């Protein structure tokens, strides 16, 4: 139970931090919910909160009968896996977005890096975008 509370708290804190970093960006704020990563992250956070609420209400607070709890078990497991996959999809979409911004969005030329430095940065971004989600798939 402590792990679930920690995960839900971390997810909520991360969402608040993302919105605050967009709102407080100087010289001009970044719009909120401007990318597929934002919408997938919001959907994942909503699914996680529903999963936590249903799990808490049905297993820890004894309002549902035992047969009802047993019937809810497989559904709860399925949606738990769905939340995990949605989280991985959110990470993968963000990784691809970063690679596109660094390599194809003119990021290197706007920052004044030369072609060699820009190419090295693009290759590093591509490696990171593959390694991060790959490691997370192996965790469970």
Image: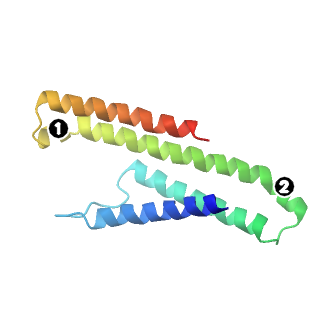
Snapshot quadrant of residue 117? top left
Check disc 1 and report its element: helix, strand or loop. helix
Q: Do the residues under discs 2 and 1 have CB atoms within 8 angstroms?
A: no
Snapshot quadrant of residue 49? bottom right
Q: Is residue 73 left or right of residue 126?
A: right
Q: Is residue 88 left or right of residue 21?
A: right
Q: Quadrant of the C terminus?
A: top right
Residue 23 % position (x, y): 29, 67
Say few, some or many: other residues with alpha carbon within 10 Å of mark 2 (under 14 / 14 to 19 / 20 or more): few
* Vertical position of residue 107 compared to residue 4: above or below: above
Check disc 2 and report its element: helix, strand or loop. helix
* Vertical position of residue 120 compared to residue 77: above or below: above
* Vertical position of residue 81 compared to residue 31: above or below: above
Q: Which residue is mark 2?
A: 71
Earlier residue among tags 2 and 1: 2
Residue under the image location 53 percent in, 54 percent down: 44
Say few, some or many: other residues with alpha carbon within 10 Å of mark 1 (under 14 / 14 to 19 / 20 or more): some
Residue 2 % position (x, y): 63, 62
Residue 93 % position (x, y): 42, 42
Residue under the image location 90 percent in, 59 percent down: 67
Q: Is residue 64 left or right of residue 116?
A: right
Q: Is residue 23 left or right of residue 92?
A: left
**Labelled disc at residue 140:** none
Q: Which residue is mark 1?
A: 108
Residue 12 % position (x, y): 49, 64
Q: Residue furthest front?
A: 2
Residue under the image location 35 percent in, 55 percent down: 34
Query: How far apart are labels 2 and 1 at the CA level?
Result: 54 Å
Residue under the image location 41 percent in, 66 percent down: 16
Q: Quadrant of the N terminus?
A: bottom right
């Amino acid at each position: 139970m402590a792990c679930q509370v920690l995960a839900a708290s971390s997810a909520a804190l991360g969402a608040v931090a993302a919105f605050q970093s967009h709102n407080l960006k100087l010289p001009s704020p970044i719009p909120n919910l401007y990318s597929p990563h934002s919408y997938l992250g919001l959907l994942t956070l909503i699914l996680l909160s529903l999963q936590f609420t249903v799990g808490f209400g049905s297993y820890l607070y004894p309002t549902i009968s035992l047969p009802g709890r047993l019937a809810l078990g497989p559904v709860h497991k399925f949606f738990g896996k769905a939340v995990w996959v949605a989280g991985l999809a959110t990470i993968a979409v963000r990784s691809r977005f970063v690679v596109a911004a660094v390599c194809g969005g003119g990021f290197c030329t706007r920052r004044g890096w030369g072609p060699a430095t820009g190419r090295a940065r693009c290759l590093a971004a591509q490696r990171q975008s593959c390694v991060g989600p790959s490691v997370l798939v192996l965790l469970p």
